[in-house]
Image (cartoon, helix red, strand yellow):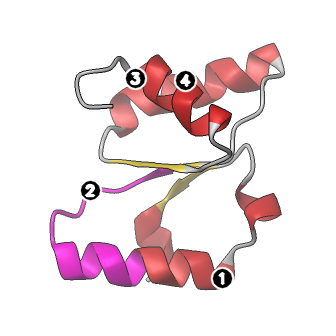
Amino acid sequence: MRGKKDEEQLEYAVSQGRMLLTFNAKHFAPLAEKYFKEGREHYGIVVTKTLDFSLLIRLTLNLLGRATAEELKNSFVWLESYQ
């Protein structure tokens, strides 16, 4: 999906029933709001600032261990909140 527009990335994630993990909060926050206003569903948008790969993995595992798929559905969350 490299090179695709942000909305295309989210649409693809939705079509696959997957949450989306991104470093791009600036563009995906408005997309989350747009989906909400239009009553469209997604499987979660998770944003992060960390470039440390081991931290990224640890936080992602924490997220997956603490939040259910249902809890993440239609949510916009910061990965760092799963320290």
**Relative height, residue 61 to residue 16 (above, below):** below
The magenta stretch spans which residues? 46-59
What distance separates the C-alpha of mark 3 from that of mark 4? 8 Å
Check disc 4 and report its element: helix, strand or loop: helix
Indicate the position of residue 43 as horizontal and vertical percent values: 68, 46
Q: Earlier in the sequence, mark 2 or mark 4?
A: 4
Measure the alpha-carbon separation of dots 1 and 2: 20 Å
Q: CA distance from mark 1 to mark 3?
A: 27 Å
- Asked whether disc 2 touches disc 3, contact meaning CB atoms under 8 Å apart, the reply is no
- Kind of element beneath mark 1: helix
Q: What amino acid is at disc 1?
A: Arg
| Closer to us: 11 or 48 | 11
Asked whether disc 3 touches disc 4, contact meaning CB atoms under 8 Å apart, the reply is yes
Pick the residue in front: 21 or 3: 3
Which residue is drawn at the image coordinates 66% and 82% (left, top)? Answer: 66
Name the element at disc 2: loop
Quarter of the image where one finds residue 52: bottom left
In the image, which is nearer the foreground, mark 2 or mark 3?
A: 3
Return the mark for residue 6: 3
Q: Furthest residue to the left? A: 52
Q: Position of residue 83 (x, y in %)?
A: 43, 83
Res 49 label: 2
Distance from the alpha carbon under mark 2 to that under mark 3: 17 Å
Other residues around mark 2 within 10 Å, as few (<14) / some (14–19) / many (≥20):
few
Position of residue 80 relative to residue 42, above or below, is below
Mark 4 lies on residue = 31
Amino acid type, mark 2: Lys
Residue for point 44% across, 74% down: 60
Which comes before the other along the chain, label 2 or label 3?
Answer: 3
Q: Is residue 31 left or right of residue 24?
A: right
